[in-house]
Amino acid sequence: MSAAPARAHRSEREAEIVATARRILEAQGPDALTMRRIGDEVGMRAPSLYKHFPGKRHVEAALVEDAFAEMGAALHRAVARPGRRGPVAAILAAYREMALANPHIYRLATGPDLPRDLLTPGLEAWSGEPFFLATGEPHVAQALWAFSHGMAILEIEGRFMDASNLDRTWRSGAQAFSLP
Amino acid sequence: MSAAPARAHRSEREAEIVATARRILEAQGPDALTMRRIGDEVGMRAPSLYKHFPGKRHVEAALVEDAFAEMGAALHRAVARPGRRGPVAAILAAYREMALANPHIYRLATGPDLPRDLLTPGLEAWSGEPFFLATGEPHVAQALWAFSHGMAILEIEGRFMDASNLDRTWRSGAQAFSLP
DNA sequence: CCCTGAGGCTAACGACGTTAGCCAAGGAGG
DNA sequence: CCTCCTTGGCTAACGTCGTTAGCCTCAGGG
């Protein structure tokens, strides 16, 4: 397993702002994530945040960075120590758990506003690497990734009309992509 | 194949507003889809739009309705006349083509702001029905749907780092879900 | 002792969705 | 024919958003 790319350092104040933003996002959803609200919670006026981050995009980028880092770590862990059910099942379980545990962050990290230009180069690729390690073939890896993301996002958005047994749906996918 | 659910009638003015909104969305993206801009293009001030729609959500809902109706029609067509490659491959091809042809609408229809409460009841279910018809088993159908959506949205967002041969990735998925 | 830079502040701008309230045109009923 | 009411436009304005400009305070270094 390759090492995670080194990420930029954050000052204490920056870390505090990012942590606050994350708390707000997860607790109250994306509409609540405003510069004024972040400022309130961190104890300063909104314009002062701009002394630490050039704009809201950059704060969100920091959240997305953390999301990629945590997801990548979880997936690398899963392929490094797959259970009896094999690497594909292991990676799917880890992916699902991570996404559902932080749904708003997951949405932000996979949404249309992804601030790629502000992300640590290589981080996104590193976080996707386990799919290649688990399947051994690039196109199957992409397909498995697409399945994972589709399942996670549809589950988060509550789009499945019969959500009573999504475990079985995840297993269907695992089986389909595990066959030779 | 079951019939598409009957949808609410639209007055001439309403249809004009929806058509304009769609044109703006597809041409300039979601940020350009503002009430003021729609009003400009349709020849009235933004507040006057509220004589025809109770709010922006309702205009967007109309766009999403059309998206579901068109996608559903395309998918039903695909399963009704699958090619030599089988119903799964046919549905995937239709899904991909539809999504990529109208990327912004597709995003709107699958995004976090889905105004389900404003949609024609049964329309969403009808548009997803072909996945069940193609696979014959509900969990596999859900899994295939998740794969389709994952592929489409990742392709639209440009998330694949190696996008040089996505045809093969789609085919990988088709094959995985076609096996008994 | 001054000076500078870091990091707060208030005021304000221009967008957004939306509401309130006004007014013209036109059809329905006496 | 006159009156009334609905339909569908309008302007003005509100509160929110991200963001900018410009001011002030204060700690640390020459």
Image: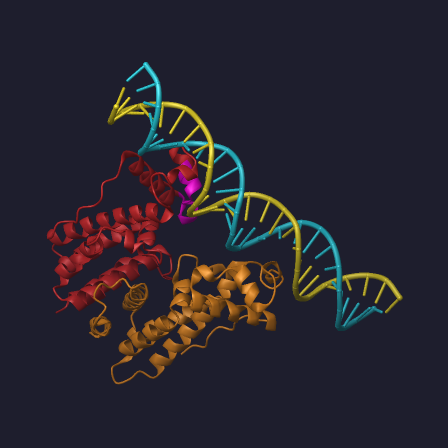
Chain colours: A orange, B red, C yellow, D cyan
**Residue at position x 26%, y 63% from top?**
B146
Q: Main secondary structure of the magenta part?
A: helix
Q: Is residue A55 magenta?
A: no
Residue B82 seen in the current view: no
**Which residue is more in the foreground, A130 or B12?**
B12
**Which residue is more in the foreground, B64 or A6?**
B64
**Residue at position x 37%, y 47% from top?**
B56
**Residue at position x 29%, y 70% from top?**
A137
Say left or right for A157 vs A176.
right
Q: What x and y, as percent, mark residue B143?
A: 22, 66
**Which residue is more in the foreground, B18 or A88?**
B18
Say left or right for B56 vs B84.
right
Figure check: A60 above or below A92:
above
Quadrant of the snapshot with the N terminus of chain A = bottom left
Quadrant of the snapshot with the C terminus of chain A = bottom left
Q: What x and y, as percent, mark residue B126?
A: 18, 54
Residue A12 seen in the current view: yes
Q: Residue B27: which quarter of the image?
A: top left
Q: Residue B42: which quarter of the image?
A: top left
Figure check: B25 above or below D28:
above
- The region drawn magenta spans B28-39
Say left or right for B143 vs C12.
left
Figure check: B94 above or below D29:
above
Q: What x and y, as percent, mark residue B69?
A: 22, 48
